[in-house]
């Protein structure tokens, strides 16, 4: 099985503070992995280091077989294979942009590794991507008119315009009600199976993690444990990560 992401001994400092210490894990192709842990555990810092947003000081990161530089942005060849869905998609709702235009941004800019093949191809890719997320009716809507659930679907369509290997999500279902969250994860899992996506996501919903993830990284600055949900979500491991006052949150659907 192909290793899409390899992290070895990663340490990331924020000033003099080690926000992430000596973290190692591997993501294989077509699998879903969740990062869990308390607030301030370094989850977002870890993701930002992998994405090349933050520099790291010690360790190694390799995506699709290419070792990355600790102080540089991702190379364009790698960046085009990754999609990132943030916890909240902040934008000015007065911006005169349609859903089609937003999704079309996922097509990328022309260049040596991504040739421009014409407006018609781009439009067809946008139409197809929206159809795959059951969002065809949204194509001409202004992005400012979208509900939370519609915005999530449109962002998934953005990921589909070009072939991706790795999706990184930071609490991507935040802001959705229980029904919307359930629909989002059903769609995400369907697309994952259909396109062979590898998924790395930050989540606080341990019930969702136990249902939909193959691997769990339990983080509190360093890795407390990692493995299958059955192993990592034990009471002992969760107390070790979150502290003795931890009470597991059950999301009711």
Image (tube, rainbow, N blue to C red):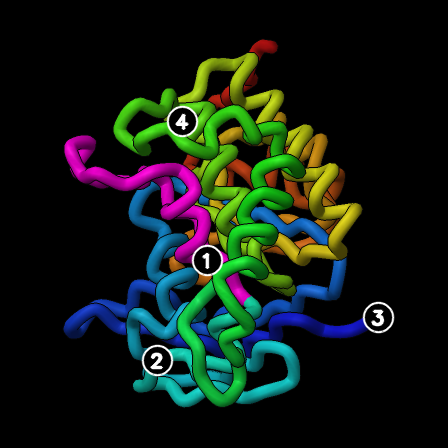
Give the labeled residue for mark 1: 106
CA separation, marks 1 and 3? 28 Å
Q: Is residue 42 left or right of residue 103?
A: left
Choose the circle earlier in sequence order: 4 or 3: 3
Tell me residue 169's x, y (percent).
48, 48
Choose the circle earlier in sequence order: 2 or 4: 2
175 vs 206, nearest the viewer: 175
Choose the circle earlier in sequence order: 1 or 3: 3
Give the labeled residue for mark 4: 245
140 vs 67, nearest the viewer: 140
Q: Is residue 221 left or right of residue 252?
A: left
Residue located at (62% from left, 28% from top): 134
| Residue mark closest to the camera, 1 vs 4 | 1
Choose the circle earlier in sequence order: 1 or 4: 1
Image vertical order of residue 130 relative to residue 160, above or below: above
Q: Is residue 212 left or right of residue 48?
A: right
Segment colored magenta: 82-105
Give the labeled residue for mark 2: 73
Query: Does residue 81 appear anywhere in the picture?
Result: yes
Q: Residues within 10 Å of mark 2 (few under 14, many from 20)?
A: some
């Amino acid at each position: 099985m192909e290793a899409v992401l390899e992290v070895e001994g990663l340490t990331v400092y924020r000033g003099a503070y080690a926000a992430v210490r000596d973290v190692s894990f591997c993501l294989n192709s077509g699998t879903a992995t969740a990062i869990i842990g308390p607030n301030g555990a370094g989850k977002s810092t870890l993701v930002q280091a992998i994405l090349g947003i933050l520099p790291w000081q010690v360790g190694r990161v390799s995506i699709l077989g290419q070792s990355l530089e600790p102080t540089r942005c991702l190379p364009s060849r790698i960046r085009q294979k990754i999609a990132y869905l943030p916890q909240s998609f902040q934008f000015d709702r007065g911006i005169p942009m349609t859903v089609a235009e937003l999704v079309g941004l996922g097509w990328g800019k022309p260049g040596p590794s991504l040739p421009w093949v014409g407006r018609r191809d781009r439009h067809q890719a946008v139409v197809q991507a929206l159809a795959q997320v059951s969002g065809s009716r949204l194509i001409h809507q202004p992005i400012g008119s979208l509900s939370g659930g519609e915005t999530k679907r449109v962002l998934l369509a953005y990921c589909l315009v070009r072939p991706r290997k790795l999706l990184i999500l930071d609490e991507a279902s935040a802001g959705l009600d229980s029904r919307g969250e359930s629909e989002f994860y059903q769609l995400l899992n369907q697309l994952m199976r259909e396109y062979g996506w590898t998924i790395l996501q930050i989540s606080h919903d341990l019930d969702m993690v136990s249902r939909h993830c193959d691997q769990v990284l339990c983080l509190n600055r360093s890795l407390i444990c990692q493995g299958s949900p059955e192993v990592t979500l034990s009471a002992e491991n969760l107390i070790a990560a979150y502290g003795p006052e931890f009470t597991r949150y059950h999301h009711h659907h």
